[in-house]
Amino acid sequence: MVLRVLDNATNDGNRNIVLTYTISGTGVTAGTTAQSLTISITDDDVVKIGNNSLTLLTQNFTTPTGWTTLSNGGTNQFITSGNFGSAGGTGPCAYVTNDINTKPNTYSATNASAAILRSPLINAQGYKNLSLSFKYSVYGETDADGIYDYGALTYATESNATAFSTLLDGPYVGSTAAISATATTTSVNALSGTKFYLGFYWQNDKTIGNNPALNIDDVVLTGEGTKIETTVSNSYAYGVSNSSFNSYFKSISNDNIIASVKSVGATVTNITASVTEAGADRLNITNGTSAFLRSRKVVKLAPTSADNTTANTTTIYFTTAEVADWSNAATLKVIKIKDGTLPSDNLNSDNSVLLTPTVDDQRAAYGFIAYTFTTTGFGSYILVDGTTVLPVSLVSFNATAEKNIVLLTWSTSNEINNVGFDVQRSTNGTAFTTIGFVASKGAGANTYSFNDGAVVSNTTYYYRLLQKDADGKTGLSNVVSVVFNGESSNVKITPNPVKNLLTIRYNVPTTVIDVVIIDVLGRKVFTAKASGTIQVNTEAWAKGGYFVQVNNGNSVQSYKVIKD
């Protein structure tokens, strides 16, 4: 029996994995104990994200930091500052000298020596395809009998910082004259994923030799990190537990990163991360009548069972090219689309959540930008412009015929930046006119009502709401209809349109009514409390639509008039 554990998760912690197995075959009897094994895995993977080549080490020896010299006690040693060396670069370099006080660029060819210029500790965990380049100048000694005074590239491990036993590249030596060159060595790629020291090694015997010894300058070590997934793909599925460490989800096909999750409120099993739609262009989202843009790329995180409640901190990643069409990529927001809703559906505050992420903009250095947000549950994620507002979601919208009015009622959830609602009416279901305005009650969930008193018997009326955001964006509700067979209203308003004098007559003379007239912006232009007939001077009004609201103590009826 062979058990194999595939660890695609990276969260820099310990996880317990329970393996249950069955033994079968001729003559095999299952035991009564030890049918489950608990294996603790110490996850030492490190993820370094970068779509560009990443620099692990750069040094021109103008102001060297962290470099040390090692020697066998011989006369010749490396120095990391001075004015006499040259390796083909500009300014100071590191070189071998026989006098660390006067610092000449000469070595003693009659004093056998071995010396190493050791780099700072290099952490290449999470990197691959390491590439090292440096400039050097060297002469030394080589003849038909062999090479005696020479330089080489070597390394030591983190745990044994003085054991430079393996040569990576070299020897560096001139046969008839000093040579200057730029070495580009891929031999360091064997050190990918480890911590190590680079060592520039010099050795000479005690016979003859030629100056200079080894001169080093402009050392640059680069590597490739984990790139960002830009194609439609998915990760393996695995569980995430409550931890402050990131669990990285990578594409099965190429090991590129899709998303990361941490700080979940409870253990969530079998999460799969996917890029369900790929591309660098932008699309319009369906969002009422508002016009907002979204990223073409869609990232989805989906547990086996839909989860809209577990708290988590999630990061999604985009390349520089994927956000190139946005001039304001560092200020974009994220929409989380709940399970069961597609990015092409009509997005609103019921099926989506608008999130303001923390942005890590690494485009200039590493070719990616990351968006991190804390939310509840999982779903699909898209980038949207920072001005995007999810429209108010109507929980219900109804029209009811009563004695002499049509009563409209509606309720909302998750109101954000809502100014209010234009109430629109039609008698044919297609041509709508605004007959009133109802101001928002504020953020959150609210209920509203509106009485349409300008109705006549034996007529079918159609109603809809035009919701208005603070930034001028709007969204239309569904249409509801009602057949009105009740009595005509007691309110008569003439003339309509009006020029200079508007007459409001209530046909129950003993009833005191409250009259409020507002303009299309919701501003009050007239108020009165009286019975019978009220006359309003409209001569100074601006041309356009106005709403007359009549409150008889039992109901409020609204009428639209036009100032001509």
Image (cartoon, rainbow, N blue to C red):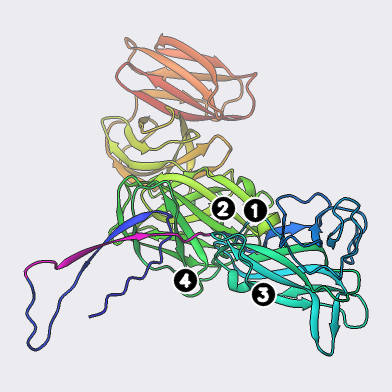
Which label belongs to residue 233? 4
* Mark 1 Cα-neighbour bin, 10 Å: few <14, some 14–19, many ≥20: some
Check disc 2 and report its element: helix, strand or loop. Answer: strand
User: Is residue 506 shown left or right of residue 155?
Assistant: left
Evaluate if marks 1 and 3 touch, with contact meaning CB atoms under 8 Å apart: no
Report the residue at 31% width, 40% height from top.
Answer: 398
First along the sequence among labels 1 and 3: 3
Evaluate if marks 4 and 2 touch, with contact meaning CB atoms under 8 Å apart: no
Q: Position of residue 120 (x, y in %)?
A: 67, 55
Numbered circles on residues, count:
4
Query: What residue is shown with label 3?
Result: 167
Residue 43 included in the magenta stretch of the image: yes
Q: Amino acid at mark 3?
A: Leu
Query: What residue is shown with label 1?
Result: 362
User: Is residue 32 shown left or right of residue 496?
Assistant: left
Q: Quadrant of the C terminus?
A: top right
Q: Which residues are magenta?
A: 32-47
Check disc 3 and report its element: helix, strand or loop. Answer: strand
Evaluate if marks 1 and 2 touch, with contact meaning CB atoms under 8 Å apart: yes
